[in-house]
Image (cartoon, helix red, strand yellow):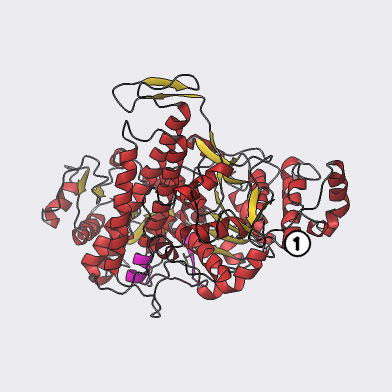
Amino acid sequence: MHSMPVITTLRDWDFLLLKRYSPQYFKKEDECSLCTYGPCKIDEKRKGVCGIGLNAHLSRMSLFTAVTGAAGHASLAETITSELIEKFGSNYPLTLSNGEPVQTPLIRLICGFKPKVLSDMQIVTSYINREITSLLSVLNMGQEGDWMDFESKTLHAGMLDNLSLEVIDMSQIAAFQFPSNNPNTPIAEYGMRNAEFGSKKPSILCIGHNSITGIEIMQYLDENNLSEKIDLYGLCCMATDMSRTPKGGVKIAGNQRDQLKFIKSGIANVIVLDSQCVRTDILHHASKMGIPVIATNPESCLGLPDRTGDETEKIVDDLLSQREAGVLIFDKKKIAQVAAETSIRRKKIPNSKFQIPNYKIRVGRGAISDIEIKNVAPPIVMGEIPGIIGFLGCPNYSPHPDPLPQGERGDGLLEMARALIDRDYIVTSGGCTAIDLAEVDADGKSLYEETTGNFDAGGFTNLGSCVSASHLLGAAIKIASVMLHRQIDGNYKEIADYILNRVGVVIIIWGPMSQKAYATATGANRLGIPVIFGNKGERYGRMLEGNNSCGWEVTDMRNKREVFAGPTPAHLMTTADSPSEALALAAKLCMRSNDTSKGRQTKLKNYIELDKLFSGNSLPDDIHLFVRTKYDMPSEYKDSISHELEKRNWKPAWIPDPTLLPNKNELTLHLK
């Protein structure tokens, strides 16, 4: 067991994964200009002047993307913990509203301890920052030169990203008493339907990811009896998290994609920006509408003057006279004061022609409770619940002709979720994707209203903002812990091996956009969880895909023999061009080598029927790889499968007690 692993601690586990899931790079040549030797044209024959080959260069760029994304979440984790300690004190307990301690399975798994007070979170952020510094050093010219080691470090960056997500959400859950372990959070309306276009009521628009900024404004309005006099709107993750406060008070206007749409509507009197996923030209578009901007984060200053030390009245006067298009303020209380006063005193002319969509979303529920985990752990591991599917990520979709109905936006996102819920998968959502899944149907109901928020077969739950991806990963860790009967503290390899071989969890990031999404996905991969991107995921330049013909042996722990287990799961990171292809892939990637025959029957039935929707074939081309014995075959397809297996000279296979670890107690290093 290892607590706080450095960049080489889990290298042996990474190499086991990379041996099975070899990176697939989408470029056959590239130009490198990372040092003054360059630019160098690098391909399969030509190396860079520094000596780096094509695969090593492309894997270095994979690390560059992952560590950039991880740094975004790591910085937010550092900022939020520091600001919460300043606000509540270093000994503020990490407990829920009912007094129970917050659940931190990722922190326990990676760092080896359970944080009890806010200052404990700084132990974690210090570790993350040290490791990110090491990874940035690796990117320097004249460092690492092997593609497998670059890829191992990429997986490490992803793990650090995942850890940051849990630090952020568990800290704000405890400090602001957000829901957690609660499947019955309220339904909230969101979208432009909330906006009063004909009204001259003052309004503030918040955009970004640090919930503290928005919550400070909410509290200021409440304390000064302004909550009914000023509308507070939010976009992106800040809005999602602001909606989780006990009193509420924010109107969710949309997600990252809706920034320009809302600004051009003219509804906002003033715009408050935080960090991450903020359009870099937002000041330009706001200025065209005459809307003042308040930037609040050192990482997104937008060239604005720092007015933190100035009097509130003077700042407001300058914004209203348009002597300043925007200002930079770091003091949270002053941000709230300036935003409120500016919104009250500024006149606005809303654009009444703006289109008004209608959505209803279930407020983010936070972590999955231990009771829910204990109820679903056995049927998940046995395969009787066909799998857990998490819809996460950004709203960057690419419409594609498909037999599956595409819905109003043409992305098929809602239709995918419905298809999986109808087949009794456990479906979760988070981030901008959770907002897009809130679209209402012809009857005026959303999927959140039509389903329960339970983490159970056929359930559909919103975990929260993009940092809530940590709760899906945490659920997989806790399922492994329950079934393995082992502590999770510092036990990364054994837990990840168990998840890879036995826990049918798959993440779908249908609209990949940011480096953060890539980092989060890569961390899930290290934990043994496959990720399916929409086709824009190819622009990340690298996937981790298996080869059907080899590499699918596991050690059977009953007899210590190496046996063929089939491609289960077939990929760790891949893409799908259409919603129906993503559904077929999700069904396939939920299969695990430990499935019982009853569980495998259910999973194969889903795979056959969803693949037919995609390909039109009566059976998937690779069906023979997933039938181990005659008892695996679903009864309604037994004849056609038997005929196909006979053509391929199929032989029954042993169902193992599987592990990739060469020794149960002591993992030895597996090199290339």
Callout 1, which amino acid?
Ser
Q: Is residue 334 left or right of residue 495?
A: left
Q: Is residue 311 left or right of residue 224?
A: left
Q: Residue 562: x percent and y percent?
A: 66, 52
Viewport quadrant of the N terminus: bottom left
Q: Residue 414: x percent and y percent?
A: 60, 53
| Callout count | 1
Q: Residue 393: x percent and y percent?
A: 48, 50
Name the residue located 49 percent from the left edge and 59 percent from the top edge: 473
Q: Quadrant of residue 239?
A: bottom left
In front of the other: 101 or 625: 625
Mark 1 — residue?
A: 597
Q: Is residue 128 left or right of residue 322?
A: right
In front of the other: 42 or 223: 42
- Considering only vertical position in the picture, is 631 above or below 50? below
The magenta stretch spans which residues? 170-191
Q: Is residue 323 one of those drawn in magenta?
A: no
Name the residue located 53 percent from the left edge and 68 percent from the top edge: 481
Q: Is residue 443 left or right of residue 32?
A: right
Helix, strand or loop under label 1? helix
Task: Sort mark 1 into few (<14), some (14-19) or many (20+) by Cα contacts within 10 Å.
Answer: many
* Residue 353 visible, this angle: no
* Residue 71 visible, this angle: yes
Q: Residue 354: x percent and y percent?
A: 45, 46
In front of the other: 232 or 656: 656
Identify the residue at the far bottom of this view: 98
- Considering only vertical position in the picture, is 551 above or below 445? above
